[in-house]
Amino acid sequence: MTSLGSFWSDSAINVNGRAALCGSISGYNNETPAPGPRNLSKLVGWRLRLEGFLVLDHYDLLGQFRAEVGPWIRDGELKYQETVVEGFENTPQAFIDMLAGANTGKMLVKL
């Protein structure tokens, strides 16, 4: 099986590029499972499509989002959680905690 490390390098695939997935014969007779997710063959069998996205891909909808969601937040219909850490001096630990998943919702540092 080809190493995906070289496949995912910056020069091997472009933004919005496509990669075809077909079969997994190279792993049929493995005595131990290959590292990584164990069910990738289902991508082929179920003909799944995976697509990454960034919120900036939909920046043109920001006005509509604010008009629709803003009142829900203001009226308490949409609730959210965030972790607030007090003090600039605690920024490094807040960052470490965020990377470790110690926050709930958005991690904020109050200055």
Image (spheres, rainbow, N blue to C red):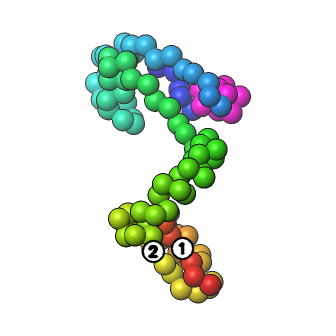
Instruction: Classify the position of the C terminus by image quarter.
Output: bottom right
Label placed on residue 108: 1
Residue 13 x %, y %: 65, 26
Residue at x 54%, y 20% (from the top left corner): 19
Q: Which residue is mark 2?
A: 83
Range of magenta residues: 6-14
Q: Secondary structure at mark 1?
A: strand
* Quarter of image, res 73: bottom left
SS assignment for the magenta stretch, majority = loop
5, above or below 56, in the image? above
Q: Judge the density around disc 1: few (<14), some (14-19), many (≥20) Cα neighbours within 10 Å.
A: some
Q: Judge the density around disc 2: few (<14), some (14-19), many (≥20) Cα neighbours within 10 Å.
A: some
Residue 31 x %, y %: 28, 24
Residue at x 36%, y 27% (from the top left corner): 40
Marks 2 and 1 in Cβ contact (< 8 Å): yes
Q: Secondary structure at mark 2?
A: strand
Can see residue 61? yes
| Type of amino acid at the residue the image marks with label 2 | Thr
| Type of amino acid at the residue the image marks with label 1 | Leu
* Quarter of image, res 108: bottom right
Confirm whether the magenta stretch covers residue 92: no
Question: Alpha-carbon distance for marks 2 and 1?
Answer: 6 Å
18, above or below 15, in the image? above
Can see residue 81? no
